[in-house]
Image (spheres, rainbow, N blue to C red):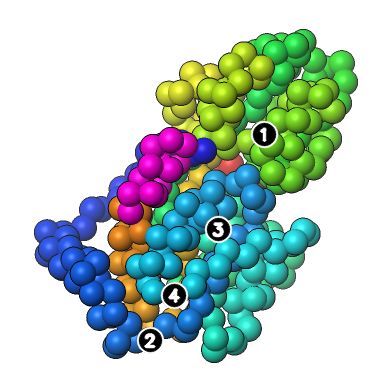
Amino acid sequence: MRQKQGKAAGHRGPSRRDVLAAGGGLIALAAHPGLLRAETPLPSTVRIYVPYGRGSVVALVCDALSEALATALSRRVEIDIPPLPDRIQRSLQALSEEDRGELRLIATDTLTHVIHDAGETARNPNAPVSLDTLVPVATLTEGYSTVLFVSKGSAAQDWAGLSTLARSRTLTVASSNPGSVHRRFLERALGQGLRDVLAPGRERVFEAVLEGRAHAGLVNTPSLVIFLRANPGQLRALVTFGGERNADLGAPTLREVTGNRALASTNSVGLFAPAGTPPEVVQQLHAALVVAAADKAVVQIVRQTGLPLQISDADDLRQTVERDRIVVVESGL
């Protein structure tokens, strides 16, 4: 349920010293999981807030990692998806509340969260930028994209057909994330507003399009790849929203069909801790994540579903957030 895209431009890899130090720490953690916890004890429960639906890549990555992460930390790991609306705000509020029985984290789509921060700042110039007030732990994915798709019986079987259809009616688009960056890109490319069909979870998005309740749908590219493998020919990818084509889908990118390079976005999942989280806790979490990602069961899930799982460090996550801020500014979102 996930797809690969390139890393942020200008990313600097770890030094040889960093690699050796991290490797030694991981070997110790794998062999003796209690070593780091003896220095900085964690609460009995680690709760990860996911401010997106069950079908999101964020939720899928967290679900895939949760059991192995619990083993690596010898702690309960709970995934919490707040109810709509304002999932991001609810998650941030939970992180700000002290609970000595839990370590609360947020796993978030960094681009979506940067747009959230920009909107909050626009409404209140004195509002703190939330990602700057949190402590970065790790990037959990390489990056993935979103795809616009239609049913096999749609009058629009390519971008030109969809553009023609849009000139005669207001199109409805199903997604689990109303008002998303991708819908805004589409509105700009088509020159008209779109109607949302809220479909919580990727299966509902597929159903809305197959049943004719929406002209098109938006899901993450890994999810559509998995659906097409199980249901060949039922749906058709029109455009993807990354900077490069998805190798599995082969559809053109939105920037290709429009010629507008600003209409592109690559999403990543970042894990953040509350303000004031000690560096040793961040290091412990990162080491445990690397161990969890190498777990045989997790590797099998990644292989079967195509999830873009790849754990990198806090510095990489900082660079990812800065990359997304540049995207937001350049695209005028």
Expressed as whole percent of the image width and height from the top left, the position of residue 110 reads: 52, 55
Badge 3 element = strand
Badge 1 element = strand
Circles 1 and 4: CB distance less than 8 Å?
Answer: no
Label 2 vs label 4, nearer the camera: 4
Badge 2 element = loop
Residue at the spot x=81%, y=24% of the render? 211
Q: Is residue 289 magenta?
A: no
Quarter of the image for residue 130 reads bottom right
Residue for badge 3: 108
Quarter of the image for residue 108 reads bottom right
As drawn, the label of residue 218 is 1
Crowd around label 2: few <14 · some 14–19 · many ≥20 (10 Å): few
Type of residue at label 1? Answer: Leu
Q: Which residues are magenta?
A: 295-311
Expressed as whole percent of the image width and height from the top left, the position of residue 21 reads: 15, 68
For the residues labelled 1 and 2, the Cα–Cα distance comes to: 42 Å
Q: Earlier in the sequence, mark 1 or mark 3?
A: 3
Q: Earlier in the sequence, mark 1 or mark 2?
A: 2
12 or 332, which lies in front?
12
Circles 2 and 3: CB distance less than 8 Å?
Answer: no
199 or 115, which lies in front?
199
Residue for badge 2: 41
Q: Earlier in the sequence, mark 2 or mark 3?
A: 2
Label 3 vs label 4, nearer the camera: 4
Label 1 vs label 4, nearer the camera: 4
Type of residue at label 3? Answer: Thr
For the residues labelled 1 and 4, the Cα–Cα distance comes to: 36 Å
Residue for badge 4: 75
